[in-house]
Image: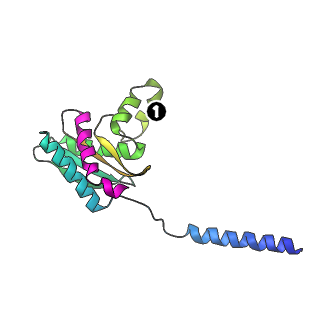
Amino acid sequence: MSFSRKLAGAAALSLALTVSASAQAPQSEKNVSMKMALMIIDGALEQCTKDGYKVTISIIDKGGNLAAMVRGDGTNPHTVEFSRLKAYTSRTRGQTSLEVQKLMEKPENWWIKQIPNVVGIGGGVPIKVGNEVIGAVGVSGAPGGDKDEVCANAGIAKVADSLK
């Protein structure tokens, strides 16, 4: 066997071992912390209270799991699940649930309605670090999804500096 073949074989083996070792390393990813979730909830609740709305606020983490939820005083029962679904929609789609609503209105996007737990109404906003979606907030209870979305954005604004 020639020296160049031996060298190529050794290089391939070395690369395979390196790839194998790095594939076993734990992942390191950005996600919504509990402190961040609570600050977002506080900001959203503050805005909605100021506007006179009784709401429930849900935070979904990067994996699509419920990280935190606060049901505001005097809210209707459906707001609990609806706020979670709005947040889940924003997390899975990487866009606001109001944008998803507009997509669902087009007949060629019929398939979006087939995705479980995705809803088309405003109030869900993705939480992003740059272009990476690390979670989402969903607000339900204001008289209209656009008003819920204002509150969700106010919550994200509370942590904007840490999302840079």
Q: Nearer the viewer, residue 158 or 60?
A: 158
Instruction: Give the answer, above or below, for where 117 lies relative to 62.
Output: above
Type of residue at label 1? Trp
* Quadrant occupied by the C terminus: bottom left
As drawn, is 127 to the left or to the right of 16? left
Instruction: Give the answer, above or below, for where 64 lies relative to 103.
Output: below
Residue 132 highlighted magenta (yes or no) = no
Start and end of the magenta stretch? 143-164
* Quadrant occupied by the N terminus: bottom right
The dominant secondary structure in magenta is: helix
**Residue depicted at 33% across the width and 58% down the height:** 162
In percent of width and height, residue 155 lies at: 25, 49
As drawn, is 141 to the left or to the right of 30? left
Residue 156 highlighted magenta (yes or no) = yes
In percent of width and height, residue 22 lies at: 57, 69
The residue where tag 1 is placed is 111
In percent of width and height, residue 19 lies at: 63, 67
Q: Is label 1 in a helix, a strand or a loop? A: helix
**Residue depicted at 34% across the width and 38% down the height:** 97
Instruction: Give the answer, above or below, for where 86 lies relative to 110.
Output: below
In percent of width and height, residue 116 lies at: 39, 41
| Mark 1 neighbour class, 10 Å CA radius: few under 14, some 14 to 19, many 20 or more | few
Q: Nearer the viewer, residue 55 or 152?
A: 152
Residue furthest out toward the right: 2
**Residue depicted at 26% across the width and 41% down the height:** 82
As drawn, is 102 to the left or to the right of 13? left
**Residue depicted at 89% across the width and 74% down the height:** 2
Residue furthest out toward the top: 107
Residue 141 falls in image quadrant: top left
As drawn, is 133 to the left or to the right of 16? left
